Image (cartoon, rainbow, N blue to C red):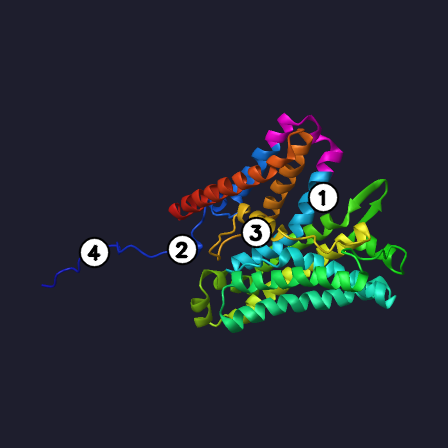
Amino acid sequence: MSQAAPPATPDRTPQKVDERLLRTSPLRRLMGRPELGSVVGAVAVFVFFSIVADAFLQASSLATVLYAASTLGIMAVPVALLMIGGEFDLSAGVMVTSSALISSMFSYQMTANVWVGALVSLLVTLGLGAFNGLMLTRTKLPSFIITLGTFLMLTGLNLGLTKLISGTVSTKSIGDMEGFASASIVFGEFTIGDTTVKATIVWWLVLIAFATWILLRTRFGNWIFAVGGGADAARAVGVPVKRTKILLYMGVAFAAWVSGQHLLFSFDVVQSGEGVGNELTYIIAAVIGGCLITGGYGSAIGSAVGALIFGMTSKGIVYAEWNPDWFKFFLGAMLLLATLLNAWVRKRAEATT
């Protein structure tokens, strides 16, 4: 007599689920964003100065704040990408001045259309960025040393060549030269109806959108994060580390060219000693925006928020009629608070994953 087979029992072995298919809550995604801490800080700064400074909420005041943020933000965006890639550029501030000086002096000495001078300046400035990247990748020296050397050389060249060519520490006026009017629209300001718009705001927004697209939607963006997370590991999986870093330095150089042309075509003449110290402000804006000093983490939007915080603080102190000597203190305090807040947000994000 045969026995009936026992009824089949369902397989209770737990099945592994591809974590890429798991749904992530909006709160968890929000906590994982690098710019979260800077956004919270920006809201706090905005509310604070709205209360203590009556003139802060006026349309003209907000326009001034936005302009101040844009002049810093144009440089903060590529500096943030460079920091995500694990490097620094201490020559970024004086490179802005170098770009303006080259454009102005070439146009004046050659009696050429100012657009020719701007093009020559672009090529030379991109060359300076490529020089930083090549020196970094060829010598294996820290970016701090490489770009500090470039900073000192450019500082000396800016002053020495300007005095040699112009006879003074500033360039000659090129306001009456051919092409100046059109260049002023592209790099200075333009009018829409009755509203005057600073060109730097447009450049800033375009750079933010372009850098965000690169980081989140392109292979090069993946390379940036990989290089910043660990160059050796990135190289092992086929990431072109040298090319990535050189291009990042050239991105900083391009933004320096844009900022330099704004400096020139907004004020007509350029002082050779300008720009010293601004490189630290660019780094501060990127750090406040969520970039890690160690690389591999950050966003372009965060750097924009960091620049906005800088703009609100620098102008808010004026509108509140405080002594502007305290600005550096507030900037340093914001840097420390933002770094601590960003570290806390990152730990919370890692704990919830």
Tell me which residue sits at (60%, 44%) in the image: 305
Q: Which quadrant holds the N terminus?
A: bottom left
Residue type at the position of mark 3: Ile
- Mark 1, residue position: 67
Marks 4 and 2, the one that precedes in the sequence: 4
Residue 19's mark?
2
Mark 3 — residue? 283
- Label 1 Cα crowd, 10 Å radius (few <14 / some 14-19 / many 20+): many
Q: Amino acid at mark 2?
A: Glu
Q: Earlier in the sequence, mark 1 or mark 3?
A: 1
Q: CA distance from mark 4 to mark 2?
A: 34 Å
Report helix, strand or loop for mark 4: loop
Amino acid, disc 4: Pro
**C-beta proximity under 8 Å, tags 4 and 3:** no
Q: Is residue 267 above or below residue 215?
A: above
- Judge whether 185 appears above or below 244 on screen: above
Q: Main secondary structure of the magenta part?
A: helix
In the rendered structure, does residue 48 fall within the stretch colored magenta? yes
4 vs 3, front mark: 3
